[in-house]
Amino acid sequence: DAGVTQSPTHLIKTRGQHVTLRCSPISGHKSVSWYQQVLGQGPQFIFQYYEKEERGRGNFPDRFSARQFPNYSSELNVNALLLGDSALYLCASSLGWAANTGELFFGEGSRLTVL
Amino acid sequence: DQQVKQNSPSLSVQEGRISILNCDYTNSMFDYFLWYKKYPAEGPTFLISISSIKDKNEDGRFTVFLNKSAKHLSLHIVPSQPGDSAVYFCAASAGGGGTSYGKLTFGQGTILTVHP
């Protein structure tokens, strides 16, 4: 069975541009979460979607937005990119929407570099 | 505001010996704790978890201990193997519903190196 898949794996953007990152969860998983991992730090929670509804939002500016589609795949959008948005963006899927109902399964991430 | 802290950036142990990775937290609302392992160019993979109603959980070579009064947990790997060399993240979640229900708060990670 395929795991969590993310695209693109690497991308380079310039300041002020917009980026869209995509994630396909494990088949049967209805929850998708997005995390940002800056070099040398642990992943930081951005969003969680369950059954196409936003169930949680981390401490990120409104430039960050996301959505979940009927097939449970998800997109993370970041507008007006800043240098500080350079990071590894991780998508994770799970069966339920509570952390203690099952572990999160992470994709390999999308490495974003903003120049 | 670092609610989950892993104060040791790195740990080096000999193959066959015990590896002990430590994690401290400050948020009393955390009631579920997890450890993840991350290899380069891969996403984190789940290792083991523990609920706050327990003080120990074991899975093969991996054991997690929770000391709620000290707000401290540790991961023991016995015996350590070279394939265990990776970055280990401690994570915590607060139950009870609400917008933080599915959110994990991660520590900064500890790089474990197991020498043959």
Image (spheres, coloured by chain):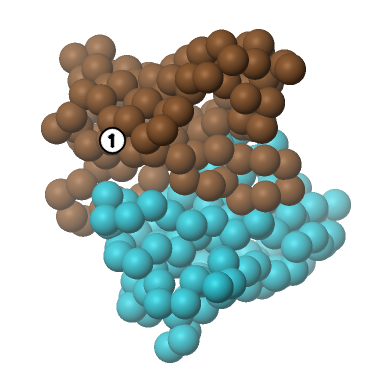
Chain colours: A cyan, B brown
Name the amino acid type tagged 1. Answer: Ile
Nearest the eye: A13 or B60: B60
State the image coordinates of residue B36 (x, y, percent, origin top left): 49, 39
State the image coordinates of residue B54 (x, y, percent, origin top left): 18, 29
Asked if residue B98 is positioned above or below residue A1 in the image, the reply reads: above
For the N terminus of chain A, the image quarter is bottom right
Q: Name the residue tied to disc 1.
A: B50
Q: Going 73% across and 48% down the picture, which residue do you hit?
A: B41
Q: Residues within 10 Å of mark 1 (few under 14, many from 20)?
A: many
Given the image, what chain letter belongs to the residue carrying mark 1?
A: B
- Determine the image quadrant of residue A98: bottom left
Q: Going 27% across and 50% down the picture, which residue do you hit?
A: A100
Q: Is residue B9 left or right of residue B32?
A: right
Nearest the eye: B61 or A10: B61
Nearest the eye: B111 or B48: B48
Q: Is residue A39 left or right of residue B96?
A: right
Q: Going 51% across and 78% down the picture, which residue do you hit?
A: A73
Q: Going 67% across and 19% down the picture, which residue do you hit?
A: B114
State the image coordinates of residue B18 (x, y, percent, origin top left): 51, 13
What is the secondary structure assignment of the residue under circle 1? strand
- Determine the image quadrant of residue B49: top left
Q: Is residue B31 visible?
A: yes
Nearest the eye: B56 or B40: B56
